[in-house]
Image (tube, helix red, strand yellow):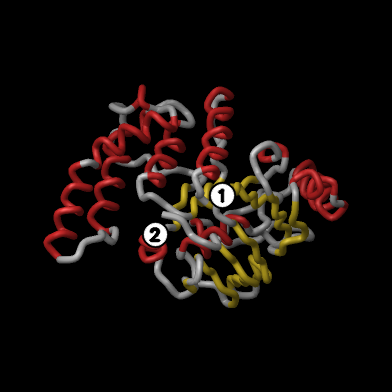
Amino acid sequence: MAAAEGLRVRAVTVRFGPLTAVDGAGLTAPPGAVTGLVGPSGAGKTTLCDVITGLRRPAAGAVLLDDADLTRSAARERARRGIARTFQRADAAGSATVRETVQAAATRHAMTREQPGRTARDRWRRRFEARRDAGAVAEALLARVGIQDHADRAVRDAPPGVAGLTDLARALATDPAVLVLDEPWAGLPVRHARALEVLLRDLAGEGLAVLVVEDEIEPVLGVCDVLHVLDDGRVIAAGPPAEVRADPRVRDAYRDAHRDAHRGGPPVTTCRSTGGDGRRRAGRRPARR
């Protein structure tokens, strides 16, 4: 699946009561490229991902994929149209194995995707064949992300980083047009981290629109074509990674964030879109994800 124009986010605003978590933010993630969304912890990145994937409705703005306006579409509809996401903390609950988790996603996609065919019988036959092949699809994806050796382990019992790579394989099993990765390198050993960089470049080379979300700039410099920097809910810089890193506004944003962290103040709390209590951190900045 490929989107002609990729993902376009226009002037998105999200509010939690009096707190503006995302303030008129916009970005573009075109097919065939790796796009980065970075910013200090609490900048609004995860909340913006929630809007992109349909987990939160914005107060203003729009989310478009190719020529379709998905702003009011539910998360399930966006997934059906080709937006897939991984999460900071992959769900490792239950006893499902790595293989079962990915195969379940492949099976679900086989049964819900639109199938070509002149008649209902033709479409059903193709759907049945796709479901039959879900196991092979899962095996290929486990090999591609490098976790086939853990296929028979429960996700919750797998080594650090494997749950995140399982989540990536699960997302790829839906044959997405846009892949949104929320801190994909978290917990990965160096070997897997390097392999993930290569994989993301390969996926972009195959026509996927890849959006990578990270706190720091350095980890994404070698993999992203374009960076967007979010601070206090606003995009303060966008462009080639080297130019963005050198932007004085970006340096100031990270200097302020690191200074606040070194002061040892109250931690940034997760906003309600990802399960926090919505409290603010003391100081100049309101807490955002």
Looking at this rendering, what residue extends furthest in the left direction? 121
| Direction right: furthest residue | 248
Q: Residue at x 66, y 66 (%)?
A: 25
Q: Is residue 50 left or right of residue 218?
A: left
Total numbered labels placed on residues in the image: 2
- Mark 2 crowdedness (10 Å alpha carbons): few <14, some 14-19, many ≥20: many
Asked if residue 6 is positioned above or below residue 202 in the image, the reply reads below
Q: Alpha-carbon neighbours of circle 1 within 10 Å: few (<14), some, or many (≥20)?
A: many
Q: Amino acid at mark 2?
A: Ala
**Where residue 32 is drawn, which disc sits there?**
1
Rendered position, 33 above or below 149:
below
Residue 175 position in % (x across, y down): 38, 49
- The C terminus, quarter of image: bottom right
Q: Which residue is mark 2?
A: 79
Identity of the residue drawn at 50% across and 49% down: 208
Q: Where residue 279 appears, x then y in whole percent? A: 61, 61
Q: Position of residue 285 (x, y in %)?
A: 75, 60
